[in-house]
């Protein structure tokens, strides 16, 4: 009995939307999905690279509703004012399961060498044990394709001192000497950052970041005297609004 | 007829003891009491909204004809001045005294530049007088006056509040006292309203936006590495890790007891911050009735008066068989009438700590002005336990509620003794109760085994038998659902904007079954019709207007569809209602 009633309610729920509207003019309780936006600079930091120090960022911004959001993501680094290695993505994100959003759109790589445009599809969300995950597949110009996986985890030392281990890897489908990309696992970054949340929105941090290039990517880097293995101290701000 | 505080008190029969010493006390508090002035800091700089008038002192209006004006009011509750939304330039609004059997007329004028409304919470009235924009009426436009007029068919302690946007959080609330036609069954010497609320200096829309961006924004009590080490020392490393793993697997937070905390809230008693110390006077040996009202937007309170036994005599305005307790939890929108008889010539603290233990509202019962009693410390914040979340599934549930080992099962989308609607599997639902149980005798997280006699729903028994008497002929089962991190709330996984009305046929007697699939405690309020709570055997137990449902709990209540029209039905946590935990109940023929 109750089961059928629930079903009936669901059907009326699904097929009779906006009954409240009628002649009342106001829909005080219909606006249960406000437009929300957020800008998050998860990493905005100085890195003690050699020969010159670098500035690095990992930022995102979104705007939208419960049903879907426009999403911008960008990550990269600059040395002496020149962007060296960066990507920017313009995506649509749509919730598909309790803990997962499907994302799709465009990824643009830029920096040294020619720019490269990809189509991107991926997921982002929270895995069991509260690992934050971003997993992308992308493919595009010059027949290149690849994958990017990123995960981080927040360890609460206290409710304001938060230690964040982070890992990110990229792998590509084929060699591209112009871009210094080799097929297979090309790059792995491992970071550990300790932040203090003065406010939720404002947290300075210090940390260490190790990065390594692998396979042909490492060989290409060796040819141009780029470092293949690198450990950097970092200091920065995590801010959002 | 409109009367201000002092005049009003004189006009009341002395037996009701309606004297409210607020204004005089305020002056004493600010000038004579160094302790209080020191504690409150900014109080000395506080400027009344209009000359010579404290805007945060209870005023009383009595009669059948009321003129109420809604407008902005400058208030200073912390060290910053903010604009509240208030009735008659008073926060809380005036206490309205009605007489059962009379027809009341309330002319409400809107001086805001946005639509407003007043809903008379728990009052039986024609649907057009219920004050819910979009359901009862279009709302009161800026500059307009709306006249509410309806016969008063009940007595007891109720309250009123805005049903428009975030105005309730901004101060648009007040107490309703309906005096009975028949003489009161209990004579009291003093009669005080004790209205609890939560105040934030933040714009409530920004509070909600923050929750949408980071749902644990206001929770600074999350489990840390230090807690893990402490748990490991106490329970052993493997048990502590297993406990962490279970919560991690579910991606849930065991300290998620309140979405908005004392980090931003100042908890008020009759509009007064703890340091301002609202005071009610008594002479030793007098019997005092305290009409507790939880007018908070988002905060449950656990209330006690150290040194005094409290006899609860009414719940949600309706008389119950008296029950003696040392502490009670008051859900958002509930009311409890409590009798105390302080015998000694000393002060007693009324202590109302928030359920998440991040702050408290406080006042004093005292024989004379300016007295204070010891203010208890906040209890240690409790956490939901492994047992709460279903690690004891195999246990006999027949004595559920007696100890925490018997708490209900919950799991991520687990199949179990309960049937979940297919709509509960969408991205807006983060958890389903695996084995919900009836736990009326469970006082709830943070109150179990605290050494005090704590009121539970099992203690609430109406003084009258089931006024309808018929068995329900239909059952409506609704699941309380949500996604904490996305900050979406719903019934059956469907938000208000995606749902049609729940239809009841006029004259029918219907059983509502609520199953709480979420980790939060939800106060569910049905407008216009009583919610007659059933005991665990399905018998009528107590008549209420707001039913609080604990995580993993299943409650049932009867509703007589005896009032035609469109009624709001919703979680009374403001941010849950605003994000979708709302339905229309449509009673038609």
Image: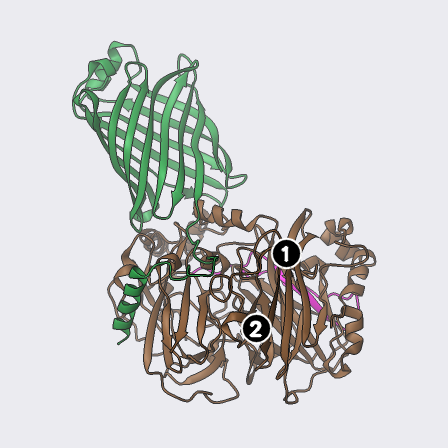
Chain colours: A green, B brown
> Where, quadrant-wise, is the N terminus of chain B in this rendering?
bottom right
The answer to whether residue A98 shows anywhere in this view is: yes
> Where, quadrant-wise, is the C terminus of chain B in this rendering?
bottom left
In the rendered image, the vertical position of residue B489 relative to residue B408, given as above or below: above
Q: Tell me if B560 is positioned left or right of A100 in this view.
A: right
Q: How far apart are marks 2 and 1 (CA)?
A: 32 Å
Question: Which residue is pictured at 44% across the width and 40% down the height?
Answer: A37
Residue B314 % position (x, y)? 57, 80
Which of disc 1 and disc 2 is earlier in sequence?
A: 1
Question: Which residue is pictured at 35% across the width and 63% down the height?
Answer: B500
Instruction: Say which of B477 and A24 sits in front.
Output: A24
Callout 1 crowding tier (Cα within 10 Å): few <14, some 14–19, many ≥20: few
Instruction: Determine the residue located farthest toward the right in the rendered image.
Output: B32
Q: Tell me if B77 is positioned left or right of A111 in this view.
A: right
Residue B153, image quadrant: bottom right
Residue B370: in magenta span:
yes
Whether marks 2 and 1 lie on the same chain: yes
Which numbered marker is on residue B538? Answer: none
* Chain at tag 1: B
Q: Which residue in the protein does label 2 denote?
A: B335
* Chain at tag 2: B
The magenta segment is: B357-384
Residue B123, image quadrant: bottom right
Q: Which residue in the protein does label 1 denote?
A: B143
In the rendered image, the vertical position of residue B238 relative to residue B4, given as above or below: above
Q: Tell me if A198 is positioned left or right of B47 in this view.
A: left
Residue B78: in magenta span:
no
Callout 2 crowding tier (Cα within 10 Å): few <14, some 14–19, many ≥20: many
Residue B317 % position (x, y)? 57, 78
Task: Count up the numbered dots.
Answer: 2
């Amino acid at each position: 009995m109750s089961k059928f009633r629930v079903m009936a309610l669901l059907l009326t729920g699904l097929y009779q939307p906006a009954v409240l509207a009628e002649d009342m003019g106001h829909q005080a309780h219909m606006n249960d999905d406000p437009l929300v936006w957020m800008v998050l600079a998860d990493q905005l930091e100085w890195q003690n690279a050699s020969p010159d120090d670098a500035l690095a960022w990992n930022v995102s911004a979104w705007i939208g509703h419960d049903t879907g959001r426009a999403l911008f993501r960008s990550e990269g680094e600059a040395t002496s004012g020149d962007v060296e290695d960066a990507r920017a993505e313009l995506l649509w994100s749509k919730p598909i399961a309790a803990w997962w959003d499907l994302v799709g759109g465009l990824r643009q790589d830029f920096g040294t060498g020619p720019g490269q445009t990809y189509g991107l599809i991926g997921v982002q969300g929270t895995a069991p044990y509260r690992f934050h995950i971003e997993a992308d597949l992308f493919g595009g110009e010059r027949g290149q394709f690849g994958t990017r996986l990123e995960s981080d985890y927040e360890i609460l030392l206290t409710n304001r001192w938060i230690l964040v281990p982070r890992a990110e890897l990229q792998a590509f489908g084929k060699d591209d000497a112009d871009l210094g990309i080799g097929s297979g696992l090309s790059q792995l970054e491992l970071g550990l950052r300790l932040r203090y949340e003065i406010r939720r929105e404002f947290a300075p941090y210090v940390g260490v970041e190790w990065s390594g290039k692998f396979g042909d990517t490492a060989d290409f880097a060796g040819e141009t005297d780029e470092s293949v293995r690198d450990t950097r101290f970092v200091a920065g701000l995590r801010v959002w609004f | 007829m409109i009367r201000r505080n002092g005049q009003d008190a004189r006009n009341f029969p002395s037996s009701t003891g309606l004297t409210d010493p607020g204004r005089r006390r305020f002056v004493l508090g600010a000038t004579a009491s160094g302790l209080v002035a020191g504690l409150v800091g900014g109080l000395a700089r506080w400027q009344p909204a209009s000359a010579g008038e404290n805007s945060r002192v209870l005023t009383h209006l009595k009669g059948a004809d009321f003129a109420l004006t809604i407008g902005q009011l400058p208030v200073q509750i912390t060290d910053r001045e903010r604009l509240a939304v208030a009735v008659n330039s008073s926060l809380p609004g005036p206490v309205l005294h009605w007489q059962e059997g009379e027809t009341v007329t309330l002319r409400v004028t809107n001086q805001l530049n946005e639509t407003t409304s007043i809903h008379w919470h728990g009052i039986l009235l024609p649907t057009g007088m219920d004050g819910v924009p979009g359901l009862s009426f279009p709302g009161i436009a800026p500059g307009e006056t709306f006249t509410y007029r309806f016969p008063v068919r009940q007595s007891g302690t109720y309250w009123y509040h805005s049903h428009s946007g975030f105005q309730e959080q901004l101060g648009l609330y007040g107490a309703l006292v309906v005096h009975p036609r028949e003489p009161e069954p209990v004579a009291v010497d003093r009669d005080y309203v004790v209205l609890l609320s939560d105040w934030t200096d933040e714009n409530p829309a920004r509070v909600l936006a923050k929750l949408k961006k980071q749902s644990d924004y206001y929770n600074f009590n999350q489990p840390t590495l230090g807690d893990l080490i402490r748990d490991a020392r106490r329970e052993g490393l493997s048990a502590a890790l297993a406990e962490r793993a279970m919560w991690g697997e579910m991606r849930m937070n065991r300290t998620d007891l309140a979405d908005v905390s004392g980090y931003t809230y100042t908890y008020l008693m009759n509009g007064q911050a703890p340091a301002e110390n609202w005071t009610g006077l008594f002479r030793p040996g007098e019997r005092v009735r305290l009409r507790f009202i939880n007018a908070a937007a988002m905060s449950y309170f656990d209330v006690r008066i150290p040194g005094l036994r409290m006899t609860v005599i009414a719940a949600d305005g309706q008389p119950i068989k008296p029950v003696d307790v040392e502490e009670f939890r008051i859900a958002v929108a509930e009311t409890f009438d409590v009798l105390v008889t302080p015998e000694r010539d000393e002060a007693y603290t009324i202590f109302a700590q928030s359920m998440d233990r991040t702050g408290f509202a406080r006042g004093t019962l005292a024989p004379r002005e300016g007295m204070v009693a010891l203010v208890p410390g906040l209890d240690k914040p409790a956490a939901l336990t492994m047992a709460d979340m279903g690690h004891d599934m195999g246990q006999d549930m027949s004595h559920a509620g007696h100890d925490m080992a018997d708490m209900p099962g919950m799991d991520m989308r687990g199949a179990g003794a309960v049937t979940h609607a297919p709509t509960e599997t969408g991205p807006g639902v983060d958890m389903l109760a695996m084995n919900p149980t009836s736990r009326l005798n469970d006082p709830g997280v943070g109150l179990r085994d605290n050494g005090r006699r704590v009121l539970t729903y099992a203690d609430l028994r109406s003084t009258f038998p089931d006024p309808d008497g018929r068995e329900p002929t239909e059952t409506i089962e609704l699941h309380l659902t949500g996604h904490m991190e996305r900050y979406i709330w719903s019934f059956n996984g469907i938000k208000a904007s995606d749902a049609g009305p729940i239809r009841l046929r006029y004259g029918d007697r219907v059983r509502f079954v609520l199953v709480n699939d979420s980790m939060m405690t939800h106060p569910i309020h049905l407008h216009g019709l009583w919610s007659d709570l059933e005991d665990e055997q399905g018998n009528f137990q107590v008549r209420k207007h707001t039913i609080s449902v604990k995580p993993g709990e299943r409650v049932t209540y009867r509703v007589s569809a005896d009032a035609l029209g469109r009624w709001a039905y919703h979680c009374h946590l403001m941010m849950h209602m605003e994000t979708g935990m709302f339905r229309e109940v449509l009673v038609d023929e």
